[in-house]
Amino acid sequence: MAIVHVPVLLDEVFSLLVPSRPDAFMVDCTLGEGGHAEAFLRRYPGLLYAGFDVDPVIQGEARERLAPFAPRVSYRIGYFDELLASWEGLGLPDGAEGASRRPDLVLFDLGISMHHYLESGRGFGFGKDEALDMRLNPDAPLSAADLVNREREEELARIIYEYGEERLSRRIARAIVESRSRSRIVTTADLASIVESAVPAQYRHGR
């Protein structure tokens, strides 16, 4: 099943982001599969649009979806905070006037895409046994497998506690270190099994 992004709060976004001029310049800091982009470009035929995403694979899907609007769209690969911090007119489509313009409208649709859970094959969920990757950008230097197989126990506990808000983080980190001493942890099923065995049975069905 192909995942097609349908914005769930599109009417609310339309009500808040209204171009003040026909050739307004809009930056989508989390382009994803291009659901918002398609809606805005279709609604405003003069709108110029820049889409940022750290994942080149999902941006490729957006490019196909937005091909009918190609002259008005540009794309950048990277995290939006880094791209915005280095702003030098980096968003306007090639040939657009005023290449150093700042955006008139900025959209952030924060959160991970269902594409990553269901189609990416990078181990973002535990519903399927996949490679323990979890990189939004496949070219990033470290995968989740690299982290769980090499970080110190204390650092693993910190990561699990701070980012996973998991109160049994020390127990889970200890189990990871013990397991990797026997064999490398390489799949989501490997990691899920370690976590499951590290916590009390009644705890597995709670938050």
Image: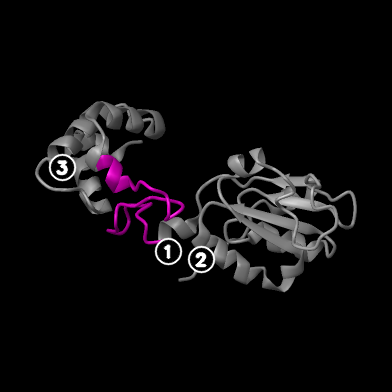
**In front: mark 3 or mark 1?**
3
Q: Is residue 4 visible?
A: no
Disc sitting over residue 119 in the figure: 1
Magenta portion: prevailing SS class = loop
Q: In this view of the protein, which residue sits in the foreground, 63 or 206?
A: 63
Name which residue lies at 31% across and 26% down: 167
Of all residues, the one furthest to the left in this rendering is 182
Residue tagged by mark 3? 180
Q: Amino acid at mark 2?
A: Ile
Tally the numbered discs.
Answer: 3
| In the image: residue 42, left or right of residue 190 | right
Residue 106: in sight, yes or no? yes
Above or below: residue 90 compared with residue 198: below
Q: Residues within 10 Å of mark 2 (few under 14, many from 20)?
A: few
Q: CA distance from mark 2 to mark 1?
A: 8 Å
Instruction: Of the two numbered discs 2 and 1 on the same chain, state the one appearing first in sequence.
Output: 2
Which quadrant does the N terminus fall into? bottom left
Instruction: Give the Cα distance between marks 3 and 2.
Output: 35 Å
Residue at left offset 60%, top offset 50%: 30
Query: Farthest residue in the right direction?
Result: 21
Labels 2 and 1 touching (C-beta < 8 A): yes
> What amino acid is labelled 1 in the image?
Glu
Q: Is residue 138 left or right of residue 108?
A: left
Q: Secondary structure at mark 3?
A: helix
Residue 105's place in the image compared with 201, above or below, is: below
Residue 169 is situated, as x and y percent measured from the top left of the image, at: 28, 29
Q: Which residues are magenta?
A: 119-148
